[in-house]
Image: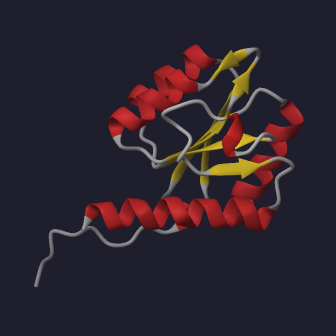
Amino acid sequence: MSSSVPPPRTATSWRVLLVEDESMVAMLLEDILAELGYEIVGPVAWVDKAVAMARGDALDAAILDVNLNGQEVYPVAEALAARGIPFVFATGYGHGGLRPPYGDRPTLPKPFRLRDVQAVLARLRHEAEAGRR
């Protein structure tokens, strides 16, 4: 019997856009994402390039540094939200550092720990899969 519901996705089939301007931070996140089995898109350090990728690339989720080279990442968040792609903000300021309407979005605290990245991406995956049902 065939079902219209796609099979659950594994971490290795999830493409995560990494938007981060600090090279050491980006390398740490790349290592963590690779260890968890995610396919990494990026890292991208410029808002314009990240917006273009958010609008057109095949993506399943994104990790967005709030401040990219002095520019806020919110245009990238808007492009992802318009496509229904889940994302998390990476910030050292917590939810209080997010401007409306993004205060309810998940945050990934800096400095990063593997278990925090794993937990927030698991949450995004769970929410995305629940939305498909």
Quadrant of the rendered image containing residue 70:
top right
- Most extreme residue toward the bottom is 1
Q: Please, is residue 86 above or below residue 42 in the view?
A: below
**Rendered location of residue 69, percent (x, y):** 76, 16
Quadrant of the rendered image containing residue 131:
bottom left
**Rendered location of residue 106, percent (x, y):** 59, 51
Viewport quadrant of the N terminus: bottom left
- Decide if residue 114 is on the left or right side of residue 121: right
- Decide if residue 31 is on the left or right side of residue 133: right
Decide if residue 59 is in sight here: yes
In front: 40, or 85? Answer: 85
Q: Please, is residue 46 above or below residue 123 in the view?
A: above
- Which residue is rendered at x = 49% and y = 27% of the image? 53
Viewport quadrant of the C terminus: bottom left
- Which residue is rendered at x = 75% and y = 47% of the image? 30
- Decide if residue 24 is on the left or right side of residue 99: right
- Which residue is rendered at x = 47% and y = 20% of the image? 52
**Rendered location of residue 58, percent (x, y):** 42, 40
Q: Please, is residue 119 above or below residue 98 in the view?
A: below
Quadrant of the rendered image containing residue 47:
top right
